[in-house]
Image (spheres, rainbow, N blue to C red):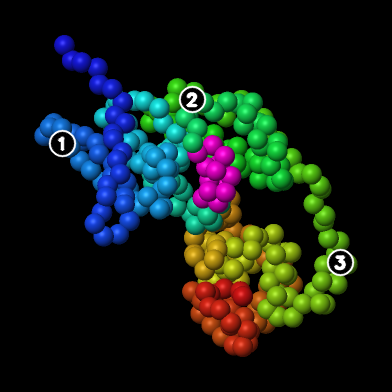
Amino acid sequence: MNSRQRYQNGSLTKKTRIRGDDVWEFRYYETTTEGQRRRRSVLIGSIARFPTRADAFREVEPIRLRLNVESKLGGPVTISALVTRYIEQELPERHLTRRSYLSSLNKWITPRWGDYVLDDVKTVAVEQWLRSLQLIPKSKAHIRSLMHLFYQNARRWEMAVRNPLELVRQSSRRLRIPRVLTEGEIRSLFEQLLEPYNTMVLVAACLGLLVSEIVGLQWGDFNWENMTVLIQRGVVQCRVGETKTETSSRPLPINPGLAARLLELEPIVIYPRLRDWLQVIERELLEVGCGGWI
């Protein structure tokens, strides 16, 4: 009869070095592909960097997680360990989304909940915490959704049997109604703007594009015969990526006034080829180069 395997905590000890600072060493058993158990060890870091045993144990949590989850041993898993695995395996590839998720994880979720075991996170406690954050409702809703997402992954990885975020209430309703500019206000705005910003704002007003989509426009995206433009990409922090949603990539009709303005600019821009960005008009405005409007 097979004996029941226990959760492997490993052993953490201080290792004295002749030269340099003393370090923490983590020892554990690992099963090889041949089914044999081998003793392993890994240096975690110096005592100066991890002053207490608890600090060092938090650092080895991802190793313990891998050892026990992969071997189906089960056991307590912390939010920090779950976040580490989520980042390694499930974090979206889209640059802006990755940056947003990592910001929420590093600034809000991990500092507050990182040391909690998954089963110790309670619905009401999360609701009270979200309510205390000095953020707009939409930002709080994003944090709630992200926590819900990696808890769902924890269930899929058989680390947790429940998702406490399923019952967390957090509205994303705006506190204020967005102000819509009148036609006269938009015309007044145009009078104050020089190129290329004048045309950039005109594109935004006529097409309703995101700034990243405006920056990503190329001359080849325009079909002058059909008077349409196809939004195919976005540029964020000089990184070219896909559009935010599938509906963003549908052809949009071009206002005749906007088409006339762009056709006037095409002969005098620096780069007018089909795959070139809708560049600025004068070279001295090219202070930093990542393509697109600056």
Q: Is residue 234 magenta?
A: no
Q: Position of residue 261 (x, y in %)?
A: 70, 77
Say which residue label 2 marks.
119
Say which residue label 3 marks.
185
Please report contact status of discs 3 and 1: CB closer than 8 Å, yes or no. no
Q: Position of residue 151 (x, y in %)?
A: 49, 32
Q: Is residue 205 above or below residue 90?
A: below
Instruction: Determine if residue 13 is in view.
Output: yes
SS label for mark 2: helix
Q: Nearer the viewer, residue 50 or 119?
A: 50
Look at discs 2 and 3 and give the one toward the viewer: 2
Q: Quadrant of the C terminus?
A: bottom right
SS label for mark 1: strand
Q: Earlier in the sequence, mark 3 or mark 1?
A: 1
Q: Is residue 140 left or right of residue 63?
A: right
Q: Amino acid at mark 3?
A: Glu
Q: Position of residue 73 (x, y in %)?
A: 30, 25
Look at discs 3 and 1 and give the one toward the viewer: 1
Q: Quadrant of the N terminus?
A: top left
Q: Is residue 240 left or right of residue 140?
A: left
Q: CA distance from mark 2 to mark 1?
A: 31 Å
Main SS, magenta residues: helix
Q: Earlier in the sequence, mark 2 or mark 1?
A: 1
- The residue lying at 44 percent from left, 34 percent from top is 78
